[in-house]
Amino acid sequence: MQSTIELLRQRVTAAVAGAFGLAEAEINPLLNRSQDDKFGDYQSNCAMGLAKKLGKNPREVAQRIVDHLDLANICSAPEIAGPGFINLRLEPKYIATQLASVPPAANAWEDRLGIDKAANPVVAAVDLSSPNLAKEMHVGHVRSTILGDCVARILEFEGHEVHRINHVGDWGTQFGMLLAYLRRTQPHVLESPDDLHLDDLEKFYVAAKTLYDADPEFAETSRQTVVELQSQQPEVMAVWRAFCYESLRHCHEIYDRLDVRLEDRGESFYRDMLPDIVRQFEKKGLAKESDGALCVFLDGFTARDGEPLPMMIRKSDGGYNYDTTDLAAIYHRIETLQAKRLIYLVGIAQKQHFQMLFAAARKIGWGGSDVELVHLGFGNMLAADGTPFKTRDGGTIKLKNLLDEAFTRAKDVIVESAADDERRAQFDEKTVNEIAAAISVGAVKYFDLSHNLSSDYKFDWDTMLSLEGNTAPYMLYAYARVRSIGRKAGIDFATLPTDAPYILEHDAEIRLARTILRFAETVHQVAADLRPNVLTDYLYDLSKAFSLFYDRKHGVRIIDAEPEPIRLSRLRLCDLTARTLRLGLSLLGIKTVEQM
RNA sequence: GCGCUCGUAGCUCAGUUGGAUAGAGCACCGGAUUCCUAAUCCGGGGGUCGCAGGUUCGAAUCCUGCCGGGCGCACCA
């Protein structure tokens, strides 16, 4: 099914071509959704620019476009407004026809509402989560994990082959530091590394880091130990493996809880490729020695002192750091995985690093113009007062604790805010826990995804768990209410007659229907621009449209609506609403519940 | 110092090829419940889009300067 916006773009383009004898390829119809419903559903803003180019009156240009515009059975008569806007409003009949063409769901888990996959699927590599091992996951990993999962889900839905790569820090200085520390203070630990628990690992890590920062001699020893690790001495490797195993075990407990699936492919994965990466740069004459280190200098990057800022691909001690590893990762993703879209969910603070990485990759010629390198640099999660989000004593907030608190608070919301004690009394402990789990994880995810990805945002429990506004609980509640209609009516939505027409007469019906229709183009847009908050905004619109449709005063009757064709039409609208909400939320990585 | 980025209603935030009277939620005020989940819905007040210039038919959006905040800047990642 072709999305409406694409259809209209084609029609307007054809009209402009016909009206002014231009080639379609050079026409931009400037067609987008209207900002305000009162202007219709879509608007084309191309008349003004065209008028200027042709030296004509913009409203006359708009009129000529409209005269050539064939929108039979799609829109009501186009209106020209203001300086030359062309406003288009979809006919309810068109909306009804489009909705009727949505195929029934194969089952709840494979329902794609008839939305086309991308015509040219590609391989995409999404770099997400990527914690440093030896430490518990903390709030700093929330955004990369949640945003990356969402991006991956949307690209998968579009039919692309997605590698979800967890680029864990398992090969850097922190392991040298940890090993050196244990050798010095806890040598017995190294004798039976498999017994080590994450809590101890974290404790040792913190102590080692403190020592590293305070004691230059220890720092030097740590760096030497990294070299030992990187030269892969067997006894060091055995300890390293045990550390990684224990850390990753913990990470995956969190991922399971978040319903995030990914492939662990840490920095160590690239360790044997690093010398070759360096050789490639040397061979092309792009590497220069500077202060004993081997560096790549790129145009336009300067350091504090105004001197050129290098990418260091080999340290003066012969070791490698993350520039080289990240270059190897790009090379691997392009050359081995054949990825055409490399997407990195890493904080905005790393922007310059990625600019340099991408510039280096372009300079050495990896991947052609068909390879897209994207750093989705996200903003920070802040406390309510705008300071970094920390525990009261300034420590890091562990992700596990955050999720635990979310769960407790979600449970409180369920218990405290319910108006219907009778219904809630039917929920047993297990049901309450399931609902609280869905709401809590959903709330944290939704709050994160609903902000502009690159903005900082203030973490606020009350807002994210509110039943009002653009929140997960509101969305989940709307879904539960739709599903409840089916239960109350004694109807399985899936068995509604597929030939029952949609009858769109009441304002609330039309609004709901046209909002549902907008889903396909919204998903395509999010896949193209990688902006999850566009999808959350859409789902909020949809929930609002449903609430209005269902409203006592402003909405319509459903279960007891008459005559039968209207009742069926409304029940089918409910079904489509539920399916759209469920699919939309699933693309955000959020699970729905049948009742709340 | 150089570079990047942000500044939108009392608060939290949307606003992406420059488009119409700048939107939403919270809070505040008012209204709706014999009725399918009112955990909802409807209405209202509230703005010099940091400031000043510029480009344009048209600027929150692009350019310049200034003010204020955040971040980055070679052997950590």
Image: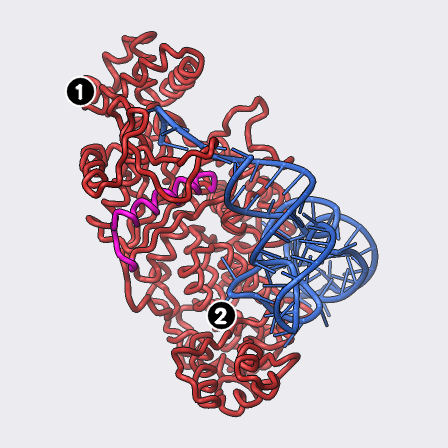
Chain colours: A red, B blue
Q: Give the side of residue A473 with respect to residue A215, left or right.
A: right
Residue A357 sits inside the magenta stretch = yes
Chain on which label 2 sits = A
Q: Give the side of residue B48 with respect to residue A127, left or right.
A: right
Given residues A460 and B73, the one toward you in this image is B73
**Magenta residues?**
A348-370
Q: Secondary structure at mark 1?
A: loop
Image: A286 above or below A52: above
* Residue at image coords 37%, 65%: A112
Q: Which residue is mark 1?
A: A233
Residue A365 sits inside the magenta stretch = yes
Q: Quadrant of the N terminus of chain A?
A: bottom left
In this rendering, the count of numbered labels is: 2
Judge depth for marks 2 and 1 and give the one in front. 1
C-alpha separation, residue under disc 2 versus residue under disc 1? 58 Å
Image: A293 above or below A377: above
Task: Indicate the amino acid at tag 1.
Answer: Gln
Asked whether the beta carbons under mark 2 and mark 1 sit within 8 Å of each other, the answer is no
Main SS of the magenta part reads helix
* Residue at image coords 59%, 41%: A458
Task: Indicate the amino acid at tag 2.
Answer: Arg
Work out which residue is located at the far left of the displayed protein and give it: A234
Q: Give percent across and percent down for residue A293.
A: 29, 27
- Indicate the quadrant where residue A218 lies: top left
Q: Residues within 10 Å of mark 2 (few under 14, many from 20)?
A: some
Q: Give percent across and percent down for residue A124.
A: 30, 53
Q: Give percent across and percent down for residue A64.
A: 54, 90
Q: Are marks 2 and 1 on the same chain?
A: yes
Image: A445 above or below A189: below
Q: Which residue is mark 2?
A: A518
Chain on which label 1 sits = A
Can residue A432 be seen at all in this image of the molecule?
no
